[in-house]
Image (cartoon, rainbow, N blue to C red):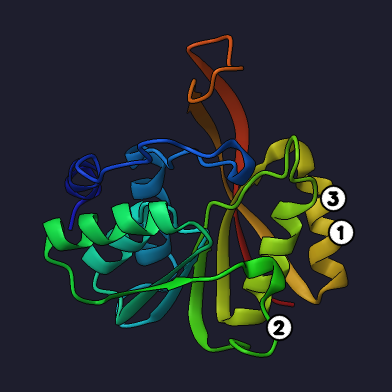
Amino acid sequence: MKLKELESCLQQVDVFEEPKILLEQYPTSPHIAACMLYTIHNTFDDIEGKLVADLGCGCGVLSIGAAMLDAGLCVGFDIDDDALGIFRRNAEEFEISNLDLLQCDLCSLEPDVYAQKFDTVIMNPPFGTKHNQGMDMKFLKAALTMAETAVYSLHKTSTRDHIQKKAKDWGAKMEVIAELRYDLPASYKFHKKKSVDIQVDFLRFSSA
């Protein structure tokens, strides 16, 4: 599947109807999702035939894209029942069967339950702003526990040094695959601008 074709398919994925600010629910744009998945698939061969986890999967754009690229199975984890409802609907519309969903709070997950159970973990975690400080790191720690091979994640470029240090502490090697501009659409009442560009790193973590 070509990149343009993947992006075009992902544009048809429904997103949050009423996003919840406390959960930092922002959709991953079809463009960014397609670029991430295409790179993971073509450069690192970490999707096809692999067991993939999508943490904080929301409405499922990354999971659905991974499934389209022939993941063996992609399991989406999310705390929010409404988001998972939209995810289910999306999966049905695309007639995708190599997907599974799990409703759980990743931050209170017993670390050993899914230890190294997945080949690859993909995620666009909460950036840990406003009420959720440190949430990005909790997601990353859970992801590193769960992945056998690699974790792929989006993080604010401004937090790169901090994440690098943490990854080292946790015995992981971090590489910056790309620097992206994350166009955050105005989704909440307190947003004054129509959209904001945030500098974001697309990162790959593997065993050091």
Which residue was labeled with disc 2?
111
Check disc 3: other Cα within 10 Å, few if <14, some if 14-19, many if 20+. few
What amino acid does circle 2 point to? Pro
Image x and y of residue 1, in percent: 17, 58
Residue 188 visible? The answer is yes
Q: CA distance from mark 3 to mark 2?
A: 22 Å
Q: Which residue is at 58% across, 86% downward?
A: 114
Asked whether the beta carbons under mark 3 and mark 1 sit within 8 Å of each other, the answer is: yes
Q: Is residue 153 left or right of residue 108?
A: left
Q: Which residue is mark 1?
A: 165
Residue drawn at (70%, 67%), measured in percent from left and top? 107
Q: Give, as a three-letter code, the residue at label 3.
A: His
Read off the residue under disc 3: 162
| Left/right of residue 162 with respect to residue 46 in the rendered view | right
Q: Is residue 159 left or right of residue 99?
A: right
Q: Earlier in the sequence, mark 1 or mark 2?
A: 2
Residue 50: x %, y % from top left: 37, 82
Residue 76: mark in rendering: none
Q: Which is more toward the observer, 44 or 130? A: 130
The amino acid type found where label 1 is placed reads: Lys
- Say above or below: 193 vs 179: above
Query: Relative to residue 82, is residue 180 depicted above or below?
Result: above
